[in-house]
Amino acid sequence: MSEPVVITGAGVITSIGAGFEEFSSALFDCRVGMTSSEVIDFGDDLQAITCEVEDFSPQRWLGPKGIRVLDRSARLLAVAAQLCLDSVERVPPDSNEGDPDLGLVCGTIFGSIHSIASFDWSGLEDGVKYVNPMAFPNTVINSPAGQAAIRHKLGGVNSTISAGLASGLIAIQYATDFLRLGRARMLLAGGVEEIAEESYLGFRKNGLLSSSQHPRPFLEERDGVILGEGSALLALELKQTAVGRGATPLAEVAGVGSSQDARRIDGFSLNAVGAERAIREALRTADIGPQQVGGIISSASGSHGGDFMELEALRRVFGDNLAGIPISCPKASCGETLGAAGAIGAAAALAAVQRREIPPTAGTEDHPQDLSLRSTPQPLTGDNVLVTAFSCEGSNAAVVLR
Amino acid sequence: MRRIVITGLGMVTPVGSGKEAFWEAVTSGTNGIAPVRSFDTSEFPVSLGAEVKDFDPRDHVRKQPPQQLGRASQMAVAAGHMAIKDARIELEGLDSNRIGVSMGTTSGEPLFVEQYNDARKAGGFDSIPGEIFPKYPCHVIPGNVAIEFGCRGPSLMIPTACAAGNYAIGYAYDLLRIGRTDLMLAGGADAFSRITYMGFARLGAIAPERCQPFDKNRKGMVPGEGAAVLILEPLESALARQANIYAEILGYGVSCDAHHMTAAHPEGAGAMRAMAAALKESGVAREQVDYISAHGTGTPTNDRVESLAARRLFGELAERIPMSSIKSMIGHTMGAASAIEAACCALALSTGVIPPTINYEEADPECDLDYVPNQARRTEPRIVLNNAYAFGGNNAALCLARWEG
């Protein structure tokens, strides 16, 4: 048996709230973070609707200094890290050296995409000689993680993980491995994604955005996603470490599973074979059967292919019992937060474990009959909560919390 | 936990592709650095780059139309084919659910960002083609490798900039060791990009004439491109199939300076911690290390700090541990660099020869170690460290050992 890994804290910033408590309350109140975007402006008539952090003011959590050099992704991640470190009552080290036993594992798809594209754009528009060299460091995909490490003196492993929409959960899996292998005392693990014109335009041009501006996960009439942003980090440590320092574990990361469809990079594998395998592996490593799952936090987003694939996988794993398992789709509230989505899902699952209820899902009329999807909270039917994160490029991940 | 060995090597580099061509080039001191061809450098104060020449994706990519893939993916797939062939392994006979892919990169597929901006400049947002978007995110690199070879186990990209190759190989080693997979394709890939080039040029970090790591007159690094894929498998399965074993992976160490986004910690604190962690995890004493594959970019700061870190960790022992940088020949291939260098370490262990640092002329009092100047050397190394440092203050050191049979 491998040493249990537990969650001892969480930091979350999303369009529905900042801080784990505010986020949980908003989720259980069925709030939806949709708004007219302040970030995106193509100069055309189409107003972008996103789930973005409105009037985002990182100074509220980070203080006035050193914000300017951080781009939007780095700010979101730095805030989530601050909230997460506060939740475990970490005292920052006096010295200038980073804490070698405290690290960060951050899932993301696009990283600092707007910094990357803007840097190149400046070369085209202003000429190479006028490009600001100080903007270059933000053009690596791991810049949010690097900036957060500097800000919070995180001297241990600093990994960025890109596995599509599964990034946030794969980051949690990676962190549990690192803890068990003795490479860190505590890891902040999760993900970040910013609303940016570049990613938004890609979703728009490929017809992936909800034209009705209403994400309806699993519903027959769903017509696409609403893009979201945010960051969620869980403080993970071995149970013995947590107990040793007198901390109270909030939940256990009981099982993890991942797979790759290896079929295409631009669409979900509708046969759901890989998704099913990831779920089964998560259950197996949690040492439970499907009947012991007391609730599901789903990655369904309103996407045609993604929701179809996930429903197919869930039906195969849970069979006729699926209708009896409460299920929730946080993307109906927070939007499709891409590389952060798995981590936000895990934070939602943590809230579910603590309250012993599955959060409601916004706009859930006419859902498939074999799904227990509701606009009100539903009690857990067991101790284990399954979190899924499936990606259109073939990565699949599932985690069991309890 | 299981012991893990390297049994296949494939690489696409500015000095040659495939194990034989690459090894011949780096042991004979071949310079792969030349004036940049892929874009106009007339606006830049520098003009050198380390590009991969004569690479035709149609020779390598089979499962998808080659031109559909970004350049980094194309090179990664090519390196994968070379590695699998080199390992003499038939993937068809294996459980594809137990084969994983772990890759590293700095920029992923940045040429699609360039296309985005070129189209935007020419005709506004409306003229940007929709099909470039799904090809851009860096997760497509392991995704395309997985598609090409039908790998259905865990797959991920670890984009930890210029240390990414070591991070990716390290985690592949972890996944095998803890028994989650039975075979891993691990490495790194990066495509030559004007974004990267402009960045380093604006930082004043690019060498004007040649790359001279550790030399007193070194003037900078030279951006490059390339890919490497290593085949990793448990010792048991390698022995069972009588595979050629290049090296055993003993362990690795990672750290973050948490100091500055681009500048190394002035005393090399993080670099030292990564090396120390790698030795500790590997159960190797400092006296046992007989070669260090340096990060050795050729910038004044990197080479000074790396030398200092080695001296601080190894003390006087540092003077008798040869430490060379193949970046003097192949340039800085970014996220591919430490993967190519790990393959190079595996070849050094299996052949007994260590590659030189070329263009080395004048000793620098601040870099006072043995950098294997200009000539490859037969030293029969048994244990080597592969260093990699990156933007974000990331450090990673991988420890490999000769397979004694």
Image (spheres, rainbow, N blue to C red):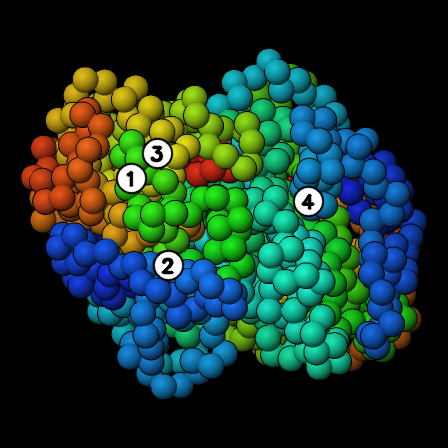
Q: Secondary structure at mark 1?
A: loop
Gap in Å between the C-alphas at discs 1 and 3? 7 Å
Mark 3 Cα shell of 10 Å, populated few (<14), some (14-19), many (≥20)? many
Q: Amino acid at mark 1?
A: Pro
- The percent coordinates of residue B77 (x first, y second) are 69, 35
Tell which of A217 and B378 is nearer to you. Answer: A217
Gap in Å between the C-alphas at discs 4 and 1? 32 Å
Whichever of labels 2 and 1 marks the residue nearer the N terminus, that label is 2
- The percent coordinates of residue A391 (x first, y second) are 44, 38
- Looking at the image, is mark 4 or mark 1 nearer the viewer? 1
Q: Quadrant of residue B134?
A: top right
The label shown at residue B4 is: none
Gap in Å between the C-alphas at discs 2 and 1? 17 Å
Q: Is label 2 on the same chain as label 1?
A: yes
Q: Amino acid at mark 3?
A: Asp
Q: Are marks 1 and 3 in contact (CB under 8 Å)?
A: yes
What is the quadrant of the N terminus of chain B in the image? top left
- Looking at the image, is mark 3 or mark 2 nearer the viewer? 2
- Looking at the image, is mark 3 or mark 4 nearer the viewer? 3
- Looking at the image, is mark 2 or mark 1 nearer the viewer? 2
Q: Residue at x 19, y 29 (%)?
A: A371
Q: Amino acid at mark 4?
A: Gly
- The percent coordinates of residue A77 (x first, y second) are 39, 65
Q: Are marks 3 and 4 in contact (CB under 8 Å)?
A: no
- Looking at the image, is mark 2 or mark 4 nearer the viewer? 2
Horizontal relation, residue B320 to residue A147: left or right:
right
The label shown at residue A49 is: 2
Q: Is residue A220 visible to the viewer in this orientation of the structure?
A: yes
Q: Residue at x 41, y 32 (%)?
A: A305
In the rendered image, which residue does mark 1 sit on? A217
- The percent coordinates of residue B284 (x first, y second) are 56, 49
In the rendered image, which residue does mark 3 sit on? A307
